[in-house]
Amino acid sequence: MAQQQAQQRRASIHDVASQAGVSAATVSKVLSGVTTVKPENAQRVLDAVELLGYRVDPLASDMRRAKRRIIGAIMPEFESEFFGQMVSELEGLAEQRGYTLVAASSRESEQREKEILARMHDWRVAGVVLAPVRNEHGPAAGFMKANGMTGVLIDRVLADDAFDTVSADSAAASAEVARALVSQGHRHVLVVGLGQQAATVRARLEGFRKTAVELAPDIRVDVVLCESDVGPLRTLLRDYFSQREDGGDRPTAVYSLFLKGTLVALSEFRRRGWHCPNDISLVGFDDAEWMQVTWPAIAAVVQPVREIAANAMEVLFRRIGGERGPPRARLEPCKVFMRESVGSPGSVPHSGGGDRQ
Amino acid sequence: MAQQQAQQRRASIHDVASQAGVSAATVSKVLSGVTTVKPENAQRVLDAVELLGYRVDPLASDMRRAKRRIIGAIMPEFESEFFGQMVSELEGLAEQRGYTLVAASSRESEQREKEILARMHDWRVAGVVLAPVRNEHGPAAGFMKANGMTGVLIDRVLADDAFDTVSADSAAASAEVARALVSQGHRHVLVVGLGQQAATVRARLEGFRKTAVELAPDIRVDVVLCESDVGPLRTLLRDYFSQREDGGDRPTAVYSLFLKGTLVALSEFRRRGWHCPNDISLVGFDDAEWMQVTWPAIAAVVQPVREIAANAMEVLFRRIGGERGPPRARLEPCKVFMRESVGSPGSVPHSGGGDRQ
DNA sequence: CATAATCGATAAATCGATTTTTCGCTGTTG
DNA sequence: CAACAGCGAAAAATCGATTTATCGATTATG
């Protein structure tokens, strides 16, 4: 059994060496499986390791390499299911390869994103998985490029000329949402998005619009974008619906392009006493566990978190291994779950106010 | 401006030294603010630092200290809002003190929890914030103690004889829930919990029961506990209600002691076509953003994440600083939000089936 | 004027590993 | 029997910083 004295300095490779009566170099060789060690000595080393409870100090061990066996992960936030799952997946994948994942939250700030990246560069991480706050053209990606860092961009990206990218195929998913809404009879849809994430939002929006117009040329697609923060969205949405209060001119369905938007939309529906799907239909990009248990269950686009994580790590480690070649942009297919929050617009007349108590 | 060659080896302290025409020791002194350096040389060093874009390698810098400026955080999962916020808070607090937070998910496994802890010990972290899977008596806490690690236990803990603990005051919050339910007229309540987390669940359960019985001696409190995993809970809950189907013998309110339980309860209500609060009332321990926007909004106990994180870090750094003394157990007060999912039992008769479409 | 004290800076030791170089010994071959 | 190849292990260099010990030059003091 390993017997260690609590609170004391841990055994180093030299302690093992003197315990076994050999040199530190020999210990290192035994532990790394070099065969040029006499079996007798190897056994003595292993015994000493066992006796002292010795374990390699991974950071000291990394000192001589150019890059350390650490992968940095930078996410815009930790609070959502999506990024929580992402970090969890990435952690497991890094671990499988003998690397440690160090995750940090940029808290939706490009400034902080870059600072964290600089710190990770100081740490000499072998690679970085960056989920940028805005898109692939932000200062963080520029920093990575300028400093020759190895990395992969995920989520709010489409393609980049310097780094591999992996993200959900938002355009295809949005097209599927369009098909579903149109086939249910919707001809006036409000799309809610975040302007900040230019490229992805455009992909989702255009993916939706293109298919919608194809299937129903007379369809009307309104768009409400809040520029930088989610805060103003509440007001924007309120105003949007207020302007259409009297006339029967309001949309029969809302497609939110991001999770917070779905929450804000639901909140606005509550305020107005509207029920889904009788008064209005709702689909959100990004799924959450609770969407299955509410009444109505909320229709949502499920992003393939595992696949994105797996592919990001795969491509990242290929680059770490020295693979050359132009960056590749990978899109992973989403699943669309049309739950109860979506119905046919004509089936039940819009109700004015709810029966809240 | 810092000009760096992409892809190249980063400038070390020796590069700065030779650039400035001094020794590495002098550079180190200038950067750490030692005053025994001639102003002229100090300036040359600073110029060289600027020119080469030099930044200290934190890991190399930590080599000579007994402990590294790293704080480990081990959470049971990353997917929930609660632990996501927790990690985010802890990260910020560590950063403020010049430390780096390395977070890992034990994925609700005590085995994994201990492995991660061992790895963090290898890393020679200065301290650990451990949110144990089960409770304060698990193998992980034992490992920390046996190895003389510095740490603080949070969340699913009450008190420990070896480590400081910080957690939500579940008992007080549960008492408040009891007060609210009793005052609304509820006299038969089902409490749903996870047996695994012995002490905390008992605190929540007893906190509820004690106050409930005080205020309404005739109250009936049923308890459904699933032992280890959340999976069986669905079945347990289904059976519980099935057995009380015909007789009017079923509870008028459910108090779930943990988030997943709240989701399962909602799911079971859906299945039966019950609406909150008309058919049954619901309160959950642990809040989530979506609970405010659903219809009905779900009543919940909000845990003071910021306070728990702040206190945990505070007490941890005091220990890192060498503070002695017996471990202290700290409880942070919760807030209880009685939202629409709670009503009076008599107000509307229980409906048999729902009007789902 | 000789010695001591002071200041500033460098050399060297240290942290804990890995890897390259060196070295001593054994066994083989000319 | 001498020279050499081969093997196993130790010594030393290395990674990038910090800290202690040392050293040289200047200034102060007896």
Image (cartoon, coloured by chain):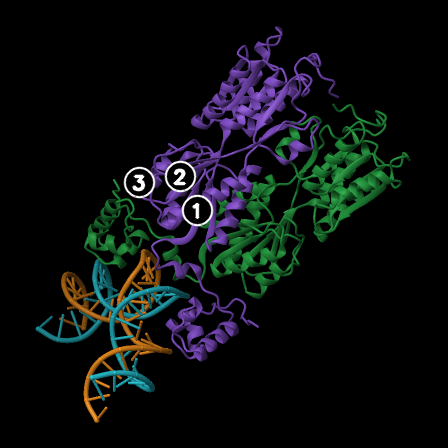
Chain colours: A green, B purple, C orange, D cyan
Instruction: Please give left or right for residue A2 compared with residue A95 in the image.
Output: left
Is residue A140 in view from this perspective?
yes
- Going from N to C along the chain, the mark reached first, 1 or 3, is 1
Q: Chain of mark 2?
A: B
- How far apart marks 2 and 3 lie (CA) works out to 16 Å
**Residue B162 point in image, percent of width and height:** 34, 37
Tag in front: 2 or 3? 2
**Type of the residue with mark 1:** Gly
Q: Quadrant of the N terminus of chain B?
A: bottom right
Q: Chain of mark 3?
A: B
Instruction: Find numbered disc 2 in the image and state the secondary structure of the residue it sits on.
Output: strand
**Type of the residue with mark 2:** Asp
Q: Which residue is outermost to the right?
A: A247
**Residue A65 point in image, percent of width and height:** 41, 61
Question: Do tag 2 and tag 3 residues touch (Cβ < 8 Å)?
Answer: no
Residue of label 3: B146
Q: Which residue is outermost to the top?
A: B247
Name the disc covering residue B164, or none. Answer: 2
On whether disc 2 and disc 3 are found on a single subunit, the reply is yes
Instruction: Find numbered disc 3 in the image and state the secondary structure of the residue it sits on.
Output: helix
Is residue A96 in view from this perspective?
no
Residue A327 vs B282, above or below: the answer is: below
Residue of label 1: B72
